[in-house]
Amino acid sequence: MSEFTEIPVLDLAPLLTGDSTAALALAFAKAYGETGFAYIINHGIDPLLRAAVFDASKRFHALPEAEKQRIAVDRRHRGYIAINTSTDVNSELADVTKPNQSSSFMMMREDPVVDPDVYLSGPNQWPDLNGFRDACEAYAGAMTELAHKLMGLALDAIGHEDRSILETFETPTIWLRLLHYPPQPPQSPDDLYGSAPHKDFGCLTLLAQDDVGGLQVQTPAGLWVDAPPIEDAFIVNVGDMLHRLSNGKLLSTPHRVINSTGRERYSVPFFFDPHVSTTIAPLSGTGEARFTPLNFGAFLKSELEASYQAHQDTPSVS
């Protein structure tokens, strides 16, 4: 991993127009082999979809707390996550003892019923808020299509020609999270974060930010580089599972959020992962395997139970 002072920008136009993506794949390999983060532009997502999901988020977070608590996050990890209820206790990047200073609404794949053999399967919980579900589902659908394209590009970047791993993303594990960060007090302790230093545990994260800022990415030297919003761009990063699939060629980079602006901050991360039954192991052609295989669903279960009260305080549910 190379030291860096800014986040690179990738122009996805060739990916959408059908032109040659050879140069883009090389740029992808460089960005995610050196930084692990990049802005993407010309991505094809309708700005109106993005505006609608931010509007839905602001209307949801403006609801009375009691109304939001009616759909408190369940064992299937869908619903409202109140402030002070999630802590990155598994972080190896900081001694995290205080919960994240954010609240959120979490949507996952909409399954009509719970399948007892599929971890986290089931329907979403929706607030009684006009147009909210439509905005979330339209946005998640568009982001799923884009993320599929990015996964193919990631395989090109590491020189993996076999596309069979993409079959595990045909029924993906998706997470749409509508985050609200209140302003942190000026005299906040150093270990109080909007989002504590962490690496994302999945494959791809596609983040839409408002104009407030606060996201920072850590360099190999331990410095923190700001990742300010760029109009209509997404900031995309690789998570631990894609790091393992790529045999370490694509980097999962630490990042954090500190909202010291005095303003409310809203962001919308979309997480794109394979089906929970997937075995995560280095792909062929990436060299001698640096990682042992793991089951994605079992890994998710351990992460969620360690970090979220909703997965700790209630009995196990099939």
Image (cartoon, rainbow, N blue to C red):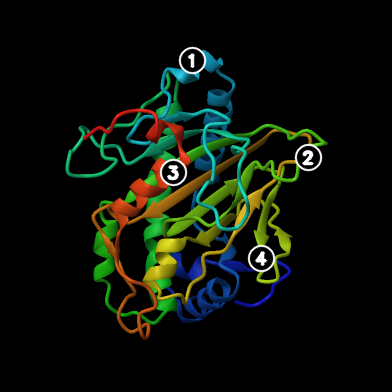
Disc number at residue 306? 3
Q: Is residue 20 visible?
A: no
Q: Position of residue 224 (x, y in %)?
A: 72, 60
Q: Position of residue 285 (x, y in %)?
A: 33, 84
Q: Does the residue at mark 1 contact the one at mark 4 (Cβ under 8 Å)? A: no
**How much space separates mark 2 and mark 3, taking CA atoms?**
30 Å
* Residue labelled with disc 4: 7
Label 4 is placed on what type of residue? Ile
Q: Which residue is mark 1?
A: 67
* Mark 4 and mark 2: Cα distance apart in space: 21 Å
Position of 41 relative to 115 (above/below) = below
Of the residues under marks 2 and 1, which one precedes in the sequence?
1
Quadrant in the picture for the N terminus = bottom right
- The image's mark for residue 261 is 2
Q: Residue at x 68, y 56 (%)?
A: 227
Measure how far apart labels 1 and 4 are at the Cα level: 39 Å
Mark in the foreground, 1 or 3:
3
The reply to whether dot 4 and dot 2 touch (C-beta < 8 Å) is: no
Q: Secondary structure at mark 3?
A: helix
Instruction: Give the CA distance from mark 3 to mark 4.
Output: 31 Å
Seen from the viewer's position, the closer of residues 258 and 19 is 258
